[in-house]
């Protein structure tokens, strides 16, 4: 590997500062190794013996020295410049490094007082690491100063941008491992710089750490010729600064110079934009740090090269407890950091180690931006009545629910304009999802070139649109985790793209429930529209309502699913989710014109209940109760159920029909399993314990069975939903093909309710006939049967 | 927009050829517009009237002229060079263009004889497009010549590489839209060129089509300065060739020159590698095609610019049926292509239009590589007995199941070495998943630099490892769709990353069931290992067994889920899935040493049944039947169930315990809902209709309820599984925390079986005590309680 090189001569750093930085780095390396191996004798006060070694060696050494180097040098610049900075630690398993640094700077002990900054605390720090009941081996919610789960790779850079948006004073460093850099989400997120406003946003400083190897393979970017890598990074819109080496002091010099160069450039770009009105898109710096994997660890073990290779990915000396030679090698390795110079006899870091460490909230482990709930303010939400649609009679008027929501969001954007703590993200679908009124208050963030024909592009906009669901999700997560608010609008079909990302966010939120020092965050809110029931264009290819199933597998204390059936209920749900904390809220709502059922006050009350009886839609004799329950969840199912109720009222007026609408899907779950779940008594009161229930549901019908299988009346439940039958066709044909249509629902009722009058058979026959007539009509005309389209409630 | 420019002077193409190419292009443009608008009067034989217009206008014009241009020019080079070429059409909604071209070249009529290549067929072609019961608006399984679903964007380039691997004679063109280029999966897949072997693989020619806009926003790459874009593409390892313009003839000239240049370079690289042993990684060409969105469509509509803007994304003239001016404009637009020059009076393409069209299987819509089942050969699978582990007594030996599978895969690799039609893909996890024996037969594909310390890297290797699940999945899909075989090995936790990709592949396979001309493909096989029950390192952060739930929401005729409980059953399942066709098989198996239960012949018989009684493990009196059924699905649950059975045998010997193991999860589903589903009689015979069933399952327990809720005995089912409780801990602590442990299962039995002897309460108490003792022990020692670890079956 060539010597360290950068744009500034390495003599810039004074010798004493250099030594202090190196002491800090050695201390953090020592503590990282200690965490992986030791459960006793933390300061090597006595010769290392097998019983000092953990029974199972877990953790990842390979990435740790590089992360420690970055942390040391971030400390230096934060202190020297009084910088408000945080760092996103992308390399998944960097736990030992980040924990070591937090312990050194004291933020760890402040967060976890039992892990004191002395020998006893060091022993605890070591023992708890990747130990049963202890702390995970990667950066996690438990880690002070972190906003980024180190489990699944790919999201560090989009998280960093999310943190930087609307935080003009903040610098977000982001270490990207050369493994993570191969993932799709990371590769896409480099272009985030086209959306970063140098005036209102902070800066992101990516640090691409090329240590050469992943688990068992070389990393692609690490094997590019230098020129090709530079072209790639410049093509991403960055200006690379290289730090390369394996000679400690030279690398310190180079890294210090690189940090200064990068921060000087960032400051210059910000000043040009903020003070001089520059509108050129800056070529933001990126630091390319090329140091050996497992640097300062064993060069070779059992005759094979280790440092600088994939063999140092996890635990370089694997047999320490049983192999005396490995034990001796570990002891030498630990001593190579000269711990006596770094820690006093009580195990406290010596002053030289602490020289580079900033104070108070400037410490990376204590910056309040990494515990966003500390900074979170209530989002100003307007009175819904100003946006509500008037509903005198159910089903008399049509509105596009998401369009009305767009007007409400415009107000939220306007009312948060001064504070800039609300963003709307989406993959180029905001207008397609009919939320475009929001552009009245703020445009679409865009720092690239603008042409005359463009509309609504806005250097300072807070609507974020990039054709990458991953980037949208990562941006929003980073934004929320640093104490702001937002909404992700997405076609229902494409939200599965972020399945694994939302997994991690849900788990993050769940874990923080047990961490009182983590303050509540604004919820992650999804608006899923352009949903599965409209396949006019594309048909079957990618439609899928299963995101609901996916999130309902997750922690019930975090997950909420709402299916507002009309415009006013959507407003009420939106109001609720935007004000909520620490949830992942999934809201499914249509964008097509659809009937208004409830006036605003009733909508609010209905949504607050989450599920309830719509007396006005049924024909139940309240004294004797219903003969059948028609239940619905979702806008299209609600329409079909109400149409079916009307058909039943007309054709079988003596039948007692109860109509139940479900907005909050978790209401169906047992009370013991979800905080929103109904008690059995409530459930039986609403659905009856013994009457047939025909439930029309937006998504996969079997989900309802899995939620409700324990209920008394469950065997009487007959669920209609999306049976994975789709094609290029009309909206009504979709419901018909999936047996969710009004005629089929009437037939279901007739098939299931005992003791109906003899006329019922004829009614059933008529229903069947309409379905067949529809079948013929659509083949010929390409449109729905007129009597389907012309239908209106209670005509 | 500047004039057309390229590396070759535009006068190269003779005037008559130029005119013929333009005629072909105009014909395809005419047909694309016709598909979007017309349901009658296809040749404009009479003035256009509202009744000729479809009632609902759907489809995407914007991308069509660009795709048509590419198709025309691919035709030219395929014919001129007798090229074996296919094209992956990335822009999602390019249906009208690709269908138009297939119809012109005749492959459409050969596939769908009712859509004749004359006026009547043209009318059918138009009417069926995005029409109820017709064909989808994007490239789909129904489209001849396609291997790429146009629904969800991001996968075109990885599909193209998958098609090119091990097809040395094939050129795979791949049109990438500037929208798709923003997605993560696409961004990652550019680096596929580091894995393409110029000797044994074909070539991929990416054509980046910058038409400037997505649905409603400018595209990021289209707004990069030319130099920055070139740097990006060179950084991706490509050498860009630009074609830019909006003057038809100049663009034809430039495009022809660009195609020739690109193909000459490809041929030169291949020849250097194949004939002269060159090992430099080629800088493969990429064509950057910059033409206006909706080119040749209406320049402006209702006073707003349309061509060249996002307004031409879908239907530029939206009100044709009601607005006479729009109708007139459409007629002018159609006439602008001079249809009379292109089609004869019977609607047949005139000779000039067909001049560039290649013949037979060289046509892009007829190349057999795009209907891979035509080329598929049986994969040579070795006799399993050669790899089977000997099992004289159940639970007497331990093996790592995936390691043994690795040996079998080595043989498959060796036996397919000459044919090169099997690949193993994985995100840098092959060795971690303990399949590394496979390297004995072939190494890891790698064309970048190699260092001395590297191992198993192989220019010609067929193991594919890149840290991008998306790229792995896309490669494998492309490989399978072109008629080859493969296996994707992945940590269970990370497979959710490809949730939405597998959705599309399942839907593709399901759709092809109704297309007899599409021949069966090798199944897409997942090996999910490093599964949810091992969280030693990382704990909770991203673990999730929900991929099974995800795929089981999909078409039952396509989806199969297998949970082999030991090494020999894994071999049997692997043998089965590798020989199967048109399925998505999900195999979940551990990599840790685990007990062997079944000898090979019994394993084979058990897997063939999919679920069955393990008599040797139970204590059932066959005459009176069991008192309780202990069922298990998955390796860890099987161990716990067998341990529980042993505890019961020891402590409650009079209890009749039946042990059932489930390998094929769909066996639990109703026979009517899944072809593998048991009949009710089979189910009742296995599980009893009325006895308590304690079922220990690998994943989320509620999945079992949703599969089995209709069964007679379902109310007696008590399911234990992964309750989303995880942390950094030992394997046994994981099962204990999720109440899946043997002691808990014994307690479940005692709680549920009526009429047990009085000693049962004491047994229950002892079980409880062990659990508490474990709790204390692990806190102190960091290991499992010795009596858990020392346990062995039937000691």
Image: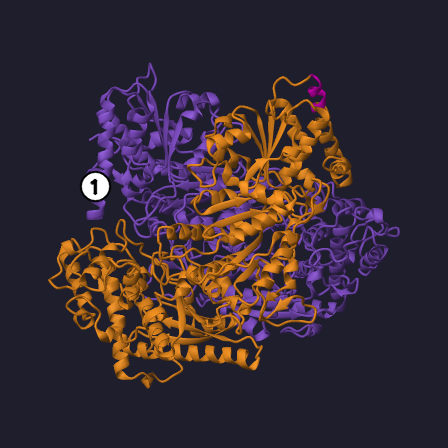
Chain colours: A orange, B purple
**Is residue B294 in view from this perspective?**
yes
Give the mark count: 1
Q: Nearer the viewer, residue A516 or B655?
A: A516
Q: Is residue A680 left or right of residue A276?
A: left
Residue B728 location (% of width, % of height): 30, 50
Residue displayed at 74% across by 63% down: B306
Q: Nearer the viewer, residue A260 or B613?
A: A260
**Is residue B117 in view from this perspective?**
no
Query: What's the magenta region?
Result: A758-764
Q: Is residue B181 left or right of residue B131?
A: left
Q: Nearer the viewer, residue B554 or B86?
A: B554
Q: Quadrant of residue A5?
A: bottom left
The question of residue B597 being in magenta is answered with no
Q: Is the residue A547 above or below the residue B249 in the image? A: above
Residue under label 1? B785
Q: Is the residue B234 above or below the residue B704 in the image? A: below
The question of residue A760 being in magenta is answered with yes
In this view, the residue farthest toward the right is: B46
Most common secondary structure along the magenta stretch:
helix
């Amino acid at each position: 590997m060539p010597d360290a090189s950068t744009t500034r001569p390495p003599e810039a750093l004074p010798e004493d500062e250099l030594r202090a930085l190196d002491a800090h780095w050695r201390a953090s390396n020592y503590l990282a190794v200690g965490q992986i191996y030791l459960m006793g004798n933390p300061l090597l006060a006595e010769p290392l013996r097998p019983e000092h070694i953990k029974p199972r060696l877990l953790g990842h050494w390979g990435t740790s020295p590089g992360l420690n180097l970055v942390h040391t040098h971030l400390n230096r610049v934060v202190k020297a410049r009084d910088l408000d900075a945080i760092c996103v630690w992308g390399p998944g398993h960097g736990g030992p490094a980040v924990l070591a640094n937090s312990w050194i700077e004291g933020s760890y002990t402040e967060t976890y007082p039992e892990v004191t900054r002395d020998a006893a605390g060091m022993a605890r720090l070591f023992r708890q690491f990747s130990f049963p009941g202890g702390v995970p081996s990667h950066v996690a919610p438990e880690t002070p100063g972190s906003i980024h789960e180190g489990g699944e790779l790919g999201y560090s850079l989009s998280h960093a941008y999310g943190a930087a948006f609307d935080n003009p004073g903040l610098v977000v460093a982001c270490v990207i491992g050369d493994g993570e850099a191969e993932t799709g989400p990371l590769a896409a997120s480099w272009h985030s710089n086209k959306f970063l406003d140098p005036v209102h946003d902070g800066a992101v400083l990516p640090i691409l750490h090329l240590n050469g190897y992943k688990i068992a393979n070389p990393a692609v970017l690490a094997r590019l010729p230098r020129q090709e890598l530079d072209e790639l990074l410049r093509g991403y819109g960055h200006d690379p600064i290289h730090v390369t080496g394996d000679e400690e002091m030279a690398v310190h010099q180079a890294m210090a110079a690189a940090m200064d160069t990068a921060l000087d450039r960032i400051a210059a770009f910000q000043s040009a934009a903020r003070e001089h009105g520059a509108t050129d898109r800056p070529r933001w710096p990126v630091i390319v740090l090329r140091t050996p994997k497992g640097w300062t660890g064993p060069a070779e073990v059992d005759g094979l090269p280790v440092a600088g290779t994939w063999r140092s990915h996890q635990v370089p000396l694997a047999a320490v407890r049983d192999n005396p030679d490995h034990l001796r090698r570990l002891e030498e390795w630990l001593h190579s950091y000269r711990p006596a110079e770094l820690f006093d006899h009580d195990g406290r870091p010596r002053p030289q180690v602490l020289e580079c460490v900033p104070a108070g909230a400037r410490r990376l482990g204590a910056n309040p931006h990494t515990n966003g709930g500390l900074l979170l303010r209530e989002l100003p939400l307007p009175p819904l009545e100003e946006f509500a649609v008037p509903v005198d009679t159910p089903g008399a008027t049509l509105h596009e629910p998401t369009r009305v929501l767009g007007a409400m969001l415009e107000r939220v954007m306007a009312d948060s304009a001064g504070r800039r703590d609300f963003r709307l993200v989406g993959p180029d679908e905001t207008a397609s999802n009919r939320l475009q009124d929001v552009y009245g208050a703020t445009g679409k963030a865009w720092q690239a070139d603008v042409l005359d024909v463009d509309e609504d592009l806005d250097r300072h906009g807070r609507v974020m649109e990039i054709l990458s669901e991953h980037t949208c999700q990562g941006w929003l997560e980073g934004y929320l985790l640093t104490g702001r608010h937002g909404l992700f609008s997405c076609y229902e079909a494409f939200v599965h793209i972020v399945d694994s990302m939302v997994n991690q966010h849900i788990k993050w939120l769940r874990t923080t429930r047990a961490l009182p020092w983590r303050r509540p965050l604004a919820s992650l809110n999804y608006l899923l529209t352009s949903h599965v029931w409209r396949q006019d264009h594309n048909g079957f290819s990618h439609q899928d309502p299963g995101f609901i199933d996916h999130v309902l597998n997750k922690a019930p204390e975090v997950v909420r699913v709402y299916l507002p059936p009309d415009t006013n209920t959507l407003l009420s749900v939106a109001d609720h989710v935007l004000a909520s904390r620490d949830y992942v809220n999934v809201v499914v709502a249509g964008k097509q014109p659809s009937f208004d059922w409830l006036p605003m006050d009733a909508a609010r009350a209905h949504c607050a209940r989450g599920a309830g009886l719509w007396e006005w839609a049924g024909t139940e004799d309240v004294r004797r109760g219903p003969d059948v329950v028609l239940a619905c969840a979702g806008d299209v199912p609600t329409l079909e159920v109400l149409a079916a109720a009307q058909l039943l009222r007309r054709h079988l007026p003596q039948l007692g029909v109860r109509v139940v609408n479900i907005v909050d899907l978790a209401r169906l779950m047992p009370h013991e399993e979800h905080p929103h779940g109904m008690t059995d008594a409530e459930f039986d009161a609403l659905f009856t314990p013994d009457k047939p229930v025909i439930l029309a549901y937006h998504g996969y019908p079997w989900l309802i069975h899995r939620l409700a299988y324990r209920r008394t009346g469950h065997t009487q439940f007959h669920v209609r939903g999306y049976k994975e039958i789709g094609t290029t066709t009309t909206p009504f044909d979709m419901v018909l093909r999936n047996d969710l249509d009004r005629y089929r629902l009437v037939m279901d009722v007739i098939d299931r309710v005992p003791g109906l009058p003899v006329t019922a058979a004829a009614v059933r026959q008529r229903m069947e006939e309409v379905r067949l007539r529809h079948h013929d009509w659509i083949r010929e005309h390409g449109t729905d049967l007129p009597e389907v389209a012309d239908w209106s409630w209670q005509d």
